[in-house]
Amino acid sequence: MTVLLPKTLIPSLLPRPITRLNLSSHSLSHLSRATRAMSSESSQRVFQLKLDPLTGNSEWVVIEEDDEKSEAFENPQQKHLLATTSYLDMLNDSYRNRAFRMAIEKTITKPCHVLDIGAGTGLLSMMAARAMNSGETTAGANSEGMVTACESYLPMVKLMRKVLHRNKMGSNINIINKRSDELRVGVDMPSRADVLVSEILDSELLGEGLIPTLQHAHDMLLVEDPLTVPYRATTYGQLVESTFLWKLHELYGNEAKALDSIRLVPSGLDPVIHTKSQQYAMHCDAMSEEVKLLSEPFKIFEFDFWKRPESHGETELRVKGTDDGRIHAVVSWWILQLDREGTIFYSTAPRWMNSPMNTGAGDWRDHWKQCVWFVPGGMHISKGEEVCLHAAHSDTRITFELKAQGSDTDNRQYEKNVKDFNLMLPPERIAIYGDSHWRLSMLEAVRNALQERVNPLCLVADDSIFLALLVAQLSKSSHVIACFPGLRDMGAQYLRIISDANGVSEDGIEVRDKGKRYLTLDDTHQKKVDLFIGEPYYHGNDGMLPWQNLRFWKERSILDSVLSDDALIMPYKGILKARAMSLPDLWNSRRCLGEVEGFDHSVVNTTLGACGGLLSPHETPCLPYFIWQCGEIKKLSDTFAVMEFDCSKPISRCCGNVQIEFTEAGTCHGFALWIDWVMDAKNSIVLSTGPDQRCWKQGVKLLAKPVAVGTHRSRNAGECCSAVVDASFDPSSGELTIGHVFS
């Protein structure tokens, strides 16, 4: 993950998978890779924090302003530094690009001073410069105009320079490698700007720091009453019922249906675990058939770009039910009005919205989605009944509170020891812990492992609070050590709170000293570990590739000296599974760029990891996605095993090779990859993380060029009916290399 850290971190620091680095004064975006970067005061270098996914260790490397071959770009693990962002997806969004181009040409009709904040590849800056040049024919050739392009992320600045050079616009645009709140009129800019063009919006609208960026720009960088593109943004919402969304945040009710006796949220302690109170970006179209709409869409907030916004705002809405049901969530989106007159719009609304303003809402794209706000506990609504929705926004987020007309706030009383404690888990983790099949599988695996073990020492290597409780409850004579490498003190405090309710003594589970990297026999009282287990799950790795959970295998290997000769390892092994897929929407969002609204962007393709037209060794990287949310999808083959990771032995290099036969005709765009965890040596308990299990992300290896495929029985000329897929795993880096040959 590569992030630029501003002087003052915004309070809503949230990891976002595959986003773009469009950084302005206060905006902060996150990539899917676990590294960070910090710009120096001189803006001449970036310090990048590289994370080893197999150990959790990290180290700093430096990206220099003038060093095109700095370590960060030469290191194989970092060659896809920008390929893990969603810049490519954004630049392939033709609706977005066209809307901004039309609005800029309509707004900038004569030479003036334009400021582009978060300039990225310089697309909006070039649009503005071209619009001014077109206006010179009527304004006079002696009129002066200029564009100041502000971009704080050094690798993107380097890429922008290449784009401007390719389009012969290097002399038209002044690039400033700073955050916008570092810009000074008279130093970086000769005068205040007449026009602001900027696109620093995330799926929630405010998460990239739109409000503080606009505030500083209006205070310090723009003329009074400036022209802006966009002109205004309006957020909307809708009440929905959805069993799937319910499972993503309601652990108390769902685990009550489980047949085991583990209670991660015991009665009276049910606020101890929950998801963070925030909006979660999701492709709601993927679940449209299982969403019941309970209200008409309603307007929430308007944000005008042409005037200084307020940091905080509140509104209270009366929302009338259009059907009977239980409100599980608020789905929200926004609509951009790009021009002053209100003729050019762009929308992130779901497809079920049919409105003339929903331009762009029909196409799948990943850089902007809808957002979901979970309603804790849910709320029943009848057709015609009104509920009260209180909405508030801060600098960087929008929050909701829902209650029935005339009702009071939640007056439930909880035990004192949970009043000030909350263990926040990702929504998908909440759903997994509430899944009866998953829990029963874990119960059976642990129960079998504990058979015929007398006073066993069990080491829970990962962040599984469920397994720690399960072992302690099933075997009162066992001694359990929990590592909690990600949860740390939060995990220990949580166990202290809920142990009694689960029939486990408070000292029944020992949490390893967080200051120690690895256990020794001194930590285990000279007793060797009999059971080494994990789900595996590492808190904070939720947006990463499936094989990065092979950290469990790495740690098992490092701790080999403290394992008994007959120690049981669970999971016993992992199997890399794959499936050939038709993924037209995803492939098109990552395809090679040519001209974008008249500007050549072909120079960015290799750096951004584009599909199509790239020569070896410039292959697309594997990226993590929820396959079921990737727009149009189709299975083209059965699931096949590529290779195995034998966790019963120390970590080692692995290779695999398999030939697959296509079972459906279509266009193959790539392969979905995941790991099935075999929990026991008998292969009797297998937990899959594949596309059919919607709470896990899969890795996606997109092809450089789509391939027409068919079956042996229905093969047409030019179609391939089989493919050979090979893979190799490097234990020193955690990298998985995928190759394929079609025939």
Image (cartoon, rainbow, N blue to C red):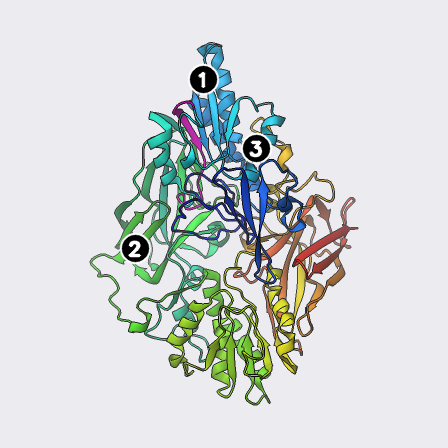
Residue 43 part of the magenta segment:
no
Point out the frontmost of discs 3 and 1. Answer: 3
Amino acid type of the residue that numbered disc 2 sits on in the rendered structure:
Glu
**Left or right of 128 on screen, residue 305:** left
**Left or right of 403 on screen, residue 697:** right
Disc ID at residue 173: none
Q: Is residue 410 above or below residue 519?
A: above
Q: Quadrant of residue 156?
A: top right
Q: Residues within 10 Å of mark 1 (few under 14, many from 20)?
A: many
Q: Which residue is mark 1?
A: 111
**Mark 1, secondary structure of its residue:** loop
Q: Is residue 542 above or below residue 612?
A: below
Where's residue 455, x and y in %?
54, 88
Of 124 and 150, nearer the camera is 150
Distance from the alpha carbon under mark 3 to that under mark 1: 22 Å
**Mark 2, secondary structure of its residue:** strand
Residue at point 57%, 71% (across, down): 518
Amino acid type of the residue that numbered disc 3 sits on in the rendered structure:
Met
Magenta span: predominant SS is loop
Which of marks 2 and 1 precedes in the sequence? 1
Residue 191 part of the magenta segment:
yes
Q: Which residue is mark 2?
A: 401
Where's residue 157, x and y in %?
55, 35
Q: Which residue is mark 3?
A: 160
Distance from the alpha carbon under mark 2 to that under mark 3: 42 Å
Residue at point 31%, 61% (across, down): 380
Q: Is residue 247 above or below residue 625?
A: below
Of 395 and 54, nearer the camera is 54
Which of marks 1 and 3 precedes in the sequence? 1
Residue 614 visible here: yes
Range drawn in magenta: 190-206
